[in-house]
Image (cartoon, rainbow, N blue to C red):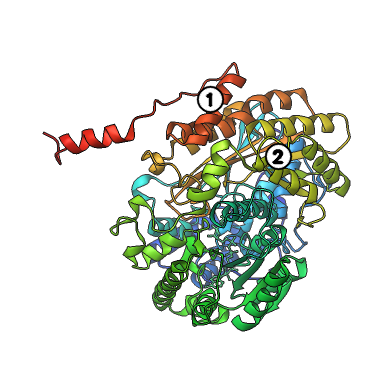
Amino acid sequence: MNPEVNFTLKDIFKELPAYPKFRKGIRRAPKREFNLSLEETSLALKNALRYVPKDWHEVLAPEFLDELLSKGRIYGYRFRPTYKIKGLPIDQYKGNIIEGKAFQVMIDNNLDLDIALYPYELVTYGETGRVMQNWMQYHLVKKYLEEMNDTQTLVMMSGHPMGLFSAPKNAPRVVITNGLMIGLFDDIDNWSRAAQLGVANYGQMTAGGWMYIGPQGIVHGTYSTLLNAGRSKLNIPDNEDLAGKLFVTSGLGGMSGAQGKAVEISGGVGIIAEVDESRIQSRYNQGWVSFIANSPKEAFDKASEYLIKKEPIAIAYNGNIVDILEYSIDHQIYIDLLSDQTSCHAAYDGGYCPVGLSFEDRTNLLKTNKEEFKKLVDIGLTRHYEAIKKITKKGTYFFDYGNSFMKAIFDAGVVEICKNKKNDLDGFIWPSYVEDIMGPLLFDFGYGPFRWVCLSGKDEDLDKTDLAAMESIDKDRRFQDLDNYNWIRDAKKNKLVVGTKARILYQDAYGRLKIALKFNEMVRNKEVGPIMLGRDHHDAGGTDSPFRETANIKDGSNIMADMATHIAFGNASRGMSLVSLHNGGGVGIGKAINGGYGMVLDGSPLRDEILKTAMLFDVMGGVSRRAWARNENALETSKQYNELDNNSHITIPYLTDELYIKNLVNSKYKKGGN
Ligand SMILES: NC(=O)c1ccc[n+]([C@@H]2O[C@H](COP(=O)([O-])OP(=O)(O)OC[C@H]3O[C@@H](n4cnc5c(N)ncnc54)[C@H](O)[C@@H]3O)[C@@H](O)[C@H]2O)c1
């Protein structure tokens, strides 16, 4: 290690920087819960002051304390960069190795003022999904990435850079964990305490795993979900789209913002309720919603015009989802597909706006009276539930869209939402979209959200990779391949890029490998600059999440996190450039363990070798677990894999005769055994 280089804020800043100005119009995170004792408050303060030299404490201690008391967290606003953070072309970053520079691009894209949900609070999306906990960590991480060489690994624990450690050349350069807690303490109260103390970060997935590519990442998943919901629930043929069908939902935030774009690409008509006008405006300016309605009547009138014409349109309704659903009931308006994408995984932290409160009232109440806010959330969710109950009775297909919506309704006290009418162990009365659609039709085959970022920042690189990816797809193999082919063919036309030049493309294990190897070859031949590969957690492997990704695992192992842990181990041992593991994902603390990876393609043969095993394991590790849970399509996919890969073998389960088992158990069973 170069003894000249120091990794302290004093060395980075030389003297205490001036307090930065806050620009008007930038969305700010609401106050987070603060309930630390006197002693714990001192501990939180001491924890934050570990990052700064003692001679700055007199200024910073009162400042940090004020942040903690007024915002519920210490963000270290003083160290917020005054320049505009943005994912720049890779060659504009300092660094000794390509990975060090590449990860700076990814971090800066996650914190881009125009992309992140609450950029000043380091929140990228999903109300609470943060890149790191505070700005002191940001500067230290940047410094480490600038200085790192190819025999070192940066160890990140909940946003805190523990340091650079010696590692082999083919080891990951960055290993990240976020919010992993000991089982006994793995609940929201203990997590909240740890977050206030400054020792826990909620990374969601691509926020804390540095792999966010804007809402494009979820547009493809939403497009596939809507098309397949139409096919399996509305009897739409495989080669047709959602023309003439109405989809109603809520949320135009970080991820939910994708819904408008996805419904338009799927050919349908969408009404998306959103309480925050600023988010509607962002999506409108971006062209992801095409009309803003200020009343339910205006929204449904516009929808009906397009339903009759059978033309697609995404309509943003500026108001609460409950109001628009109740209006549809009162006016007997038929909805084909219904969902919700408010941030229910963090309902009491501001993720769900209670009906009757404006967005501004919600923000004030959160600050002034959290208990009252919680009560109103419960009332709102109960009304929301009652409305959906009435609407689905008429034949509308409702699906939970992976935001812990039904769990939040259960937590609000509505026990009848549980299948067993007692608790959530057997799931809920309505399907999650994974249980019904994505699980059997995509994940069990290994299809998932493969993505890449052209680190050069050049449009032409993205065009070339789009074309190469499209040429790699056999569109006649399955309807999923045709959907993916159409997606990538039209991706440029659909103007999906927000931030870095990135693309998402659902692919199965071999599809991902084929494209990855092709891209590395293109980098080697200097046809394009370096490329970052990755994925999100909404995938066949990598995530154990009984309320979402693994909702269609029915052998009882849905409460285990073995698979996600193994995928992370596997990706690290095979040499992915970045490996991450998080608690919570898109559903909330204690409800999921999810991991991801980043792989920097530099054109080298070493990358080819790593890809050949890591890309397949990342997907097939998940499919094998789905097969062991007896999922039909995963079984087939695993059997094919056993034939294709002569150096791997997946254990295949014997299947039972259902009736025989049922009769046998019925005839012999006694509670508690003999
Ligand atoms: N299905 C998936 O693939 C997937 C992927 C990512 C995230 N998610 C989940 O979806 C949820 C939303 O994610 P996000 O990143 O968009 O979060 P977000 O917080 O950025 O957006 C949610 C939006 O809902 C709005 N909202 C809240 N209550 C409302 C109400 N009652 N009526 C109308 N609008 C309301 C908020 O103003 C906000 O803009 C999260 O729970 C996330 O974990 C699902």
x, y (%) of residue 663?
Answer: 23, 36
Tell me the element at label 2. Answer: strand
Instruction: Give the quadrant of ligand 1.
Output: bottom right
- Give the SS element for disc 1: helix
Question: What quarter of the picture does the N terminus occupy?
Answer: top right
Q: Nearer the viewer, residue 77 or 589?
A: 589
Residue at image mark 2: 533
* Relative to 562, 248 lies left or right: right
Q: Which residue is mark 1?
A: 639
Q: Left or right? Give the position of 598 relative to 32.
A: right
Q: Residues within 10 Å of mark 1 (few under 14, many from 20)?
A: some
Left or right: residue 383 versus residue 659 is right
Residue 133 occupies quadrant: bottom right
Mark 2 or 1: the one toward you: 1
Viewer-proximal residue, 424 or 562?
A: 424
Which quadrant of the figure contains the C terminus?
A: top left
For residue 542, which quarter of the picture?
top right
Residue 557 location (% of width, % of height):
39, 39
Q: In x, y percent, where is residue 660?
A: 28, 32
How far separated are the C-alphas under marks 2 and 1?
27 Å
Looking at the image, which is closer to me, 535 or 91?
535
Type of amino acid under label 2: Leu
| Amino acid type, residue under disc 1 in the picture | Lys
Measuring from the top left, give residue 603's x and y in whole percent: 80, 29
